[in-house]
Amino acid sequence: NFLGFFYVAATAFLLLGRTAAIAALIALGAGLYFIGCVPTDALNADQLLFPLWSGILYHLLRALRTDQWRDWIALGLLTGLSLLAKYFSVALIVVLVTNLTWISAYRRIFRNPRFYAAGIVCALLFLPTAVSVLQHPDTLQYSYGRFFLKPFELPWVEKLSLCLVTPI
C-alpha cells in the first residue's frame, strides 16, 4: 500500500500543494488501525484497488495537465490492471469518463490520440481475461452464486446493520 500512499500524496500535492499532501497522508494514516484490524491474512481485490485507483487518478490528472506520453501509458496500464484486479473498476472508469464529458474544459480529451492510446493499452491488458470469461460464462455464474450477498435472505437485524455500516 506504499504505492497508494505515494499516489494520494502526489495527487494532493498537484491539486492543493505541499501542506495538503501532508494533511492527506495524515488523514489516510489515521485509518491504518481500521485497515490493519481486519482479522484476515487473505489478500483481496479491494486491497489491490487502493494503489491502482490512486494511480489512475494521479496519472489522469497529470495527463490532463501535461499531456505527456508516460502519464497516458501509465493510465492505460493501471486501468487495465485495475480491471484485472476487480471488474467493479468499470464503475470508476464510467465515473471518470462521465466527468470528462460533463465538464466542458475536459471535453478536449476526446480529441487527443493519447487518450485512445491509453484505452488501447488498457484493452490489451484486459483482453485475454475478457475473451476467457466470454468463452466460459459459467465462471461468472459460479462467482455470483458463491460471493453475491443476498440481502433479502438476511434476518431484519442484519439488514439494518448493513444499512448502517455500509455507508461508513
Image (cartoon, grey):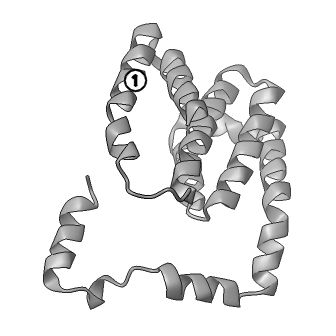
Q: Nearer the viewer, residue 129 or 96?
A: 129
Where, quadrant-wise, is the N terminus in this rendering? top right
Whether residue 147 can be seen here? yes
Kind of residue indicated by mark 1: Ala
Query: Eyeballing the image, is 80 above or below 55?
Result: below
- In the rendering, at what x and y percent does residue 119 appear? 78, 49
Instruction: Name the spot of residue 49 as percent of width and height, x first.
Output: 56, 49
Describe the element under mark 1 as helix, strand or loop: helix
Q: Position of residue 14 (x, y in %)?
A: 54, 17
Q: Residues within 10 Å of mark 1 (few under 14, many from 20)?
A: some
Q: Which residue shows up at 84% across the image and 51% down it?
A: 120
**Residue sitting at x 77%, y 87%:** 136
In the rendered image of this protein, does residue 94 appear above or below residue 156?
Answer: above
Q: Is residue 124 left or right of residue 46?
A: right
Above or below — where is 133 with respect to 126? below
Q: Is residue 159 left or right of residue 61?
A: left
Residue placed under numbered mark 1 in the picture: 24
Q: Nearer the viewer, residue 38 or 56?
A: 38
74 or 41, nearer to the observer: 41
Q: Is residue 168 above or below residue 22?
A: below
The percent coordinates of residue 148 (x first, y second) are 46, 80
